[in-house]
Amino acid sequence: MAGVVVSGGDAQGFEGRITAYVILCAIIAAFGGLMFGYDIGISGGVTSMDDFLEKFFPAVYARKGKVQENNYCKYDNQYLQLFTSSLYLAALVSSFGASKVCSKFGRRPTMQIASTFFMTGVILNAAAMNIAMLIIGRLFLGAGVGFANQAVPLFLSEIAPAKVRGSLNILFQLFITIGIFIANMINYFMSNVHPNGWRISLGLAGVPAIILFLGSLIIPETPTSLIEREKLEEGRRTLKKIRGTDNIDAEFDSIMEASEMARQVKDPFRKLLKRSSRPPLVIAIVMQVFQQFTGINAIMFYAPVLFQTVGFKNDASLLSAVITGLVNVFSTLVSVYLVDKAGRRLLLLEACVQMFITQGIIGAILLADLSPTSSLNGTEAGIVVLLVCLFVAGFAWSWGPLGWLIPSETFPLETRTAGFAFAVSSNMLFTFIIAQSFLSMLCHMQAGIFFFFAAWIVLMGLFAKFLLPETKNVPVDAMVERVWKQHWYWKRYMIEEDGDYGYKMKNLESGPSK
């Protein structure tokens, strides 16, 4: 399987502008993110609806109604957690198949397959009569997420001029946040539709999947994918169209050269095991681990459950989830504006401070004033909602979008598709772990769970400070020379290995590491 190539755009002196056509294509593709985000948001709201619990999880429903039931444990149920987490297990597995499809057949067919899987899962979930149908439906949804999360960020990176690659790629995360917000709104209104409001909530997940499927029929394949698969004239025509100029020879030749290099690599997954592949691979995987261990998905999956735990009634908890979803959307817009100006590392470091403080204060409030059988007073509960919003805001302009952006732009040409598959699968693995364990962790750790996530945020900050290079305005084709070979630590891995990649150490100032 050949790797994927991405041109550096105008940062290498190529002509071209940000065309309306590119923006349209990016928005259509980003519906893959909305599809993913809607599912993240809908599952937490549905699992707090009494009609849903009574039908599928009667033990949880009965426990929820007990006056003296432990606040932290009322939702602790492995099958209930499996309803949420099974999607991510399927996405983990499917991401590797999606990598091969993405390279062999292109980004558009991969998006179409994603939509088909997702729509199948939606039908099964909305029509579910038992837990088995629910879980099977979630597995189909997961396959769709795995394919979409592989194809969409690559598509966005490949059609974007380098100077706006960060902003355009973050459309994926922006649409994830919009999907979460829409799901929270729908859950809020459907919670009062009895007995099938939950079916409507789950069924509406098919809307973004249909939009992505129909949209993928009209958007072009990326020029890099076409050229890589030796469809040269079609690649040239598409490149002219998305750049808005006929003068694309320099960029076309650059993609041709890079594609020929990538085509010589027959087994990119094996290349990832080489020493020179370690820096981007480690960065990609660690970014996904840290993204999940901020605790964000624990909050976004189970926001209504969390707010009920601290004393909100059902409608109020769903409304609080709507508020956090809205904060999520607008804070992601901050990242769209700043990522190519302030840079990646500054956003990540600032957010670590913000998220650490908010998690710590939430934990302290719950530890001091929320016993297993009491509720916070109105003022304290409101403060918790405010702190959750500040936490979500910090995540939304940093580790959320950049967790997808950085792996999509840092792999060498020869291993990019395979490397990004590892990023997607790692994200899905740790999302599964958090989704499957959060309610049990909340039950056993109680307020301590917030200190647990705060400790991880400290590690994230140290990682971003010392081991994460800045990639702002660096063309994708130049990452090795301008980023990895210049970094104080990672440059030691860039010594040529048996001719791999054709890279050579070129008199680094400090000399090659021993």
Image: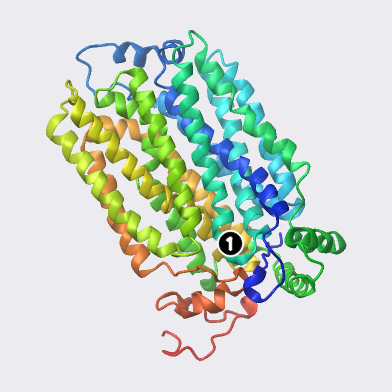
Q: Is residue 229 visible?
A: no
Badge 1: residue crowd in 10 Å (few <14, some 14–19, many ≥20):
many
* Location of residue 19 with respect to 45 vertically, above or below: below
Residue type beneath disc 1: Val
Residue displayed at 48% across by 17% down: 190
Residue at point 70% right, 73% down?
14
Residue 73, image x, y percentages: 27, 24
- Give the image quarter of residue 440: top left
- Say if 496 sits above or below 400 in the image: below
Q: Quadrant of the C terminus?
A: bottom left
* Number of dots carrying numbers: 1
Q: In front here: 401 or 293?
A: 401
Residue 373 in percent (x, y) is at 17, 20
The correct choice, above or below, for 144 with respect to 46 in the image is below
| Residue 48, picture quadrant | top left
Q: Which residue sits furthest right?
A: 233
Task: Quadrant for residue 409, please give it.
Answer: bottom right
Kindly identify which residue carries mark 1.
164
Q: Is residue 367 visible?
A: yes
Residue at 40 percent across and 13 percent down: it is 50
Residue 468: x and y in percent read 41, 67
Q: Residue 142: horizontal and vertical position, in percent?
A: 57, 36
Q: Please say if 495 is above or below 49.
A: below
The colour scheme used to paint the residues is rainbow
Give the farthest residue toward the top: 195
User: Callout 1: helix, strand or loop?
Assistant: helix
Query: The N terminus appears in which quarter of the rendering?
Result: bottom right
